[in-house]
Amino acid sequence: MRILITNDDGVYSPGIAALAQVASRFGEVRIVAPDVEMSSASHSITASRPVTYKHTPLPGLDAYRVNGTPGDCVMLGTTLWEKVDVVLSGINIGANLGNAVWHSGTLAGAKQAALLGLRGIAFSAPATDREQPNFESLKPWVASVLEMLLGIPDLCLVNVNFPAKAPRGTLWTRQSLRHYDGKTVAAKDPMGRTHYWFTVVPVEATEEGTDRWAFEQGYVSMMPLSLDLTDHQALSRVQQLEAWKKLKFA
Ligand code: MN
């Protein structure tokens, strides 16, 4: 099995090395990742300039860096290395739960794989200013999650989040959409000009069964995702309305 590994924290992140080391037990591994941090870059693709692909020495790993986004890395990685079976993205330094799924560059790497007809799995672990994820202690969990997910061939896209402490187990989840957790804060620069910071603030209550709930309860959250963003309920409502109008005015 050929496993391409990317992330949005950049090729030198300790998280990508940890993921690649675990993945090496499952198949042939190659890292293709952004040369600098691309967190919150979401699913952007570099269309207005060319990108480069440079071999990057990482101990014991076959790695390349790209001056682009996670999406670029997967496009280029799967073109320059044929017959990739699965793309793994992460392990991100920071959780990707609920609304963050829309902004996440980590998830975009996995999503790009799914758009190319391959399988994609994103991994994230929480971090604070003081504390980075302990990737060594997460490795056995990465291995058991990989074993489980790779064994289910029709799972095309999965977003995995590890909890802050040693996990109690794994849970299948849905996306938490109850709150938007961002906040815009105004501040002054040294010249007295106003600028703004986009921040992430904790949310209070979360619904049972969601990714954020599992995370808060200390479980590894595994959320299957679909590429189809259609609101099927809304679609059938408006189609019914259309049909009714046609009947009424026929
Ligand atoms: Mn990141």
Image (spheres, rainbow, N blue to C red):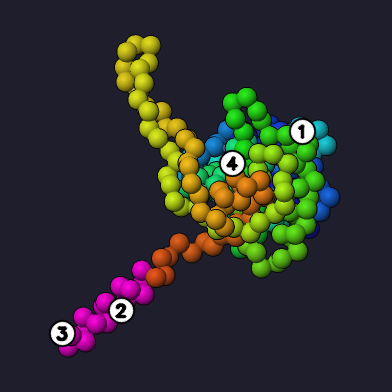
Query: As displayed, is residue 102 above or below residue 8?
Result: below
Residue 137, label in figure: none
**x%, y% of residue 195?**
35, 23
Instruction: Give the mark nearer the N terminus: 2 vs 3.
Output: 2
Residue tagged 4? 95
- The residue mark sitting in front, 1 or 3, is 3
Mark with earlier residue (3, 4): 4
Task: Find disc 2 in the rendering and name its residue.
Answer: 240
Residue 74 visible at all: no
Give the residue type at disc 2. Gln
Instruction: Kindly indicate the quadrant of the structure image that contains residue 229.
Output: bottom left
Side (left or right) of 187 relative to 150: left
Query: Which of 6 and 223 lies nearest the eye of the viewer?
Result: 223
Q: Earlier in the sequence, mark 4 or mark 1?
A: 1
Q: CA distance from mark 3 to mark 4?
A: 53 Å
According to the picture, the residue beneath numbered tag 3 turns out to be 249
* Residue 246 relative to residue 138: left or right: left
* 242 w.r.t. 62: above or below: below
Quadrant holding the N terminus: bottom right
Q: How far apart are the alpha carbons under marks 4 and 1?
A: 25 Å
